[in-house]
Image: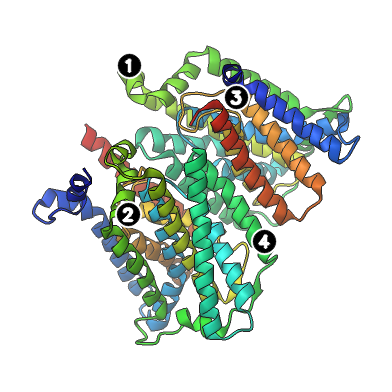
Amino acid sequence: MATSVAAKVSGPAGINAGRAVRRYGWTVAVYVLFATLMVATLIVKPDFGAFEWNTLTLAALPLAFAAAAQTMVVLSGGIDLSVGPLMALANVLALRATVGHDLRYSVGVALLVLLEVTLAGALNGAIIVLTRVPDIVVTLAMSFVWAGLALLVLAKPTPGIPLDFQNLAQGSTFSPWVPNALLLLLVIPLVWIPLRRSRAGLAIYAVGSDRNAAFRSGVNLGLSRVLAYAVGGFFAACGGLALSMTTGVGSPLAGTYYTLSGVSAIVLGGVSLAGGRGGMLGPLAAAYILSLIPAVLIYLGIDPNYGQMIQGVLIVIVVMIGGIGTVLRRA
Amino acid sequence: MVRLVQQRSIVVLIALLVALAGLIEVIRPGAVNANWVSNILEFAAPLGILAAGQTLVVITSGIDLSVANVATASAYIMASQAPFGVTRGIIAGLLVGIVVGLVNGVGVAVFRVQPLIMTLAMGLVVTGTLNVYSQASVRSVPGVPDVIHTLGSGTVLGYVPVSLFLWALLAAVLIVGLRGTGFGRLLYALGDNPEATRLAGVRGWQVLLANYTACGLLSAVAGIVLAGTVNAADLSLANVLLLPSVAAVVIGGTSIFGGSGSYAGTIVGALILTVLNSVLTLLDVADAVKQVLYGAIIVLLAAAYTRVLGRE
C-alpha cells in the first residue's frame, strides 16, 4: 500500500512536461521574481557590493528558518502560529546560557537549545494530536505560553552573545560573496533532503494531502504530525539562534515579527496552506524576497514603514493570482 | 447526562463562568460584588463585539486574523479625525472596517483565497498603512472624544455600563439574525457544505462578501468601544485581542470547521476569558507567568470542550 504512495511522489520526473510545470512552475516563478528584484536593486543602487549582499543574507537568515519551520508544519496539514515565540525562546535561552563564555561552550549551549525548542515544537504537535483541538487554536494559545516563558527567561532585551559565536554568522570565511549567513542555510537541506527521501517524510506529505488516504495506507497519523511539528520546532530554534548570531542580543519579543512573515514567505514560496503540496526551495527564495523589499525601499529613500504595507499587498496580489488560477482550472 | 451536556453546552459554560467567579470569591472574599460585575461587563464588551465578527466568519468555516488590526486602525483613525467633528471621526473609523472587510471578502469570495492568508496579509496592510498614516498626519497620539469615552466606560444607575446597551443590541440582532433570517441560515449552510449550497442555487460569493464586510464593521465598532474603555487610541490598542477573539468563539462552542455554533456561546466565551483575566490579575503574579497560564488554560478549556462534547 505504501509503495503506491511512494511511486506517486518520487516516481520518474521530467517525462511529463505538463506535470513538471505544475510541480516546479511556481518555484521557478519565485526565483525569477527574486532575480528581477535583484536586478532592480542593482539599477537603484549601482554600488551594491559584497557588504550589501552580506547585510541581505543576515536579514534573511532568521526569516528563512522561520519559513522552513512553517513549511514543515503546513506540509503536514497543520499551521504553527507559535513559530515566532519559539524563536524568541531559543534566542533568550541562548543569551542566558552563553553570556561571558567562549565559542566552544556557546556551540554546546546552542545544541542544547536546539534540543529544547525541538521538544517544545513536539509538545505543540502532541497537544494537537492528543486533544484533537484544531491546530490554529492550540498554536495560537501556545504562542502565549512560549512568549511568556521567553519573558520569564529574560525580562528585557539584553546584549551579550559572545562575539566568536556571532561571527559564525556575521563573517565571511571563504569569500566576501559567500557570507557565512548564506552557508548556515545549508542546515535546511541537510535536515530536509534526508527527511524528504525517508518514509517519515513521505508520511508527512501523505498526512498533509489526504488524511484518510494516509490512514488507510497504514501511515501513523499522530506520529507523523508530531514529527512535523518537532522538525518545525528545530527550524524555529535555528531561527532563534540565527537571531542571536545576527543581532548579538537576546530579546523576548524578537520573534513576534516572524510568525506572520514566515506564513507570508511560505505562501509566496508556493506551499499550499491546505497541506501536502510544496517544498523548501520556494520558501527560501521568498524569505530573500521579503528581506530585500525593505532594503530596496531604503535605497530608494522611501520610508521603510511602507515595507509592511508592501509586503501585505504583494502577498494579497500573489494569492489572488493563485486564486484566479484555481478558478480558471475549475471552469 | 452526557446527552444533556451535549445539547445544552451553554449551561456548562455558564457553570464554568460561575465557578471562576466563585474562585475569585475564595481567593479574595468580598471581591465579587456589583462593582466587579460592572467592570467585567465593561471589559468584556469590546471583546464580545470583536468576537461577534469572528463568530460570523468562523461559522462559514473561515477565520479573520485581521480583526485586531482593523479594530486598532479604526480607533486610531476615529480619534485622529475627531477634532474635525466626532461624527466624522466615527464615520471614518467605521469606514476603515467596512473597506478592509470588503477587500477580505473579495479575496475570499471572488478569488477563492484561503481566509487565513487573505486576512493575515490584509492585517499587515492595515497595520503598515496605519503606521505610515500616523507618521504622516498626526503630531501626537490623538485623544479620545468624550462621547466615545462615555460609550466605552460610562455607567448608568451607577453599575450598568453604557457599552452593555450597544453590545446587547448587537447581540440581539446577531442571535435573531443567525437563527431566524435566510442570510443567517446561509452562513451555516456555507460552512457546513459549500458544494451542496451551490447546487441549491445559492450565490455563495455574495453571502461571503457581505459576511466579511459585516465582520470588518463589527471589528471597527469593537475598536472604537475599546478606545473609549481604555481612554486611549495608540498604534497597538487592540492587538492583544486577536487570540481572545478566536478563543471566545472556540470556547463558546462554534466549530472552527464551520457549520455550527452560535453567538450566545461566544458571549459566554468572552465573559469567561474576561473573568479568567480577572482571576490571573488577582493571583498577583508576574505578567510573564500570567501569559503562560492564560495560554495554557485556553488550551485546557478547548481540550475539555472537545473531549466532553465529542466534537472536533
Q: CA distance from mark 2 to mark 1?
A: 44 Å
Q: Nearer the viewer, residue A113 or A183?
A: A113
Q: Where residue A222 sits in the image (x, y, percent)?
A: 41, 45
| Horizontal relation, residue A125 to residue B240: left or right | left
- Residue B263: assigned label: 3
Please, what is the three-letter code of the amino acid marked with disc 4? Leu
Please, what is the three-letter code of the amino acid marked with disc 1? Gly
Please, what is the three-letter code of the amino acid marked with disc 3? Tyr
Give the chain of mark 4.
A
Which tag, 2 or 4, sits closer to the chain's start?
A: 4
Circle 2 packing at 10 Å, graded few (<14), some (14-19), many (20+), is some
Question: To which residue does mark 4 refer?
Answer: A151
Question: Looking at this rendering, what residue extends furthest in the right direction?
Answer: B30
Question: To which residue does mark 2 refer?
Answer: A200
Q: Are marks 1 and 4 on the same chain?
A: no
- Residue B20: assigned label: none
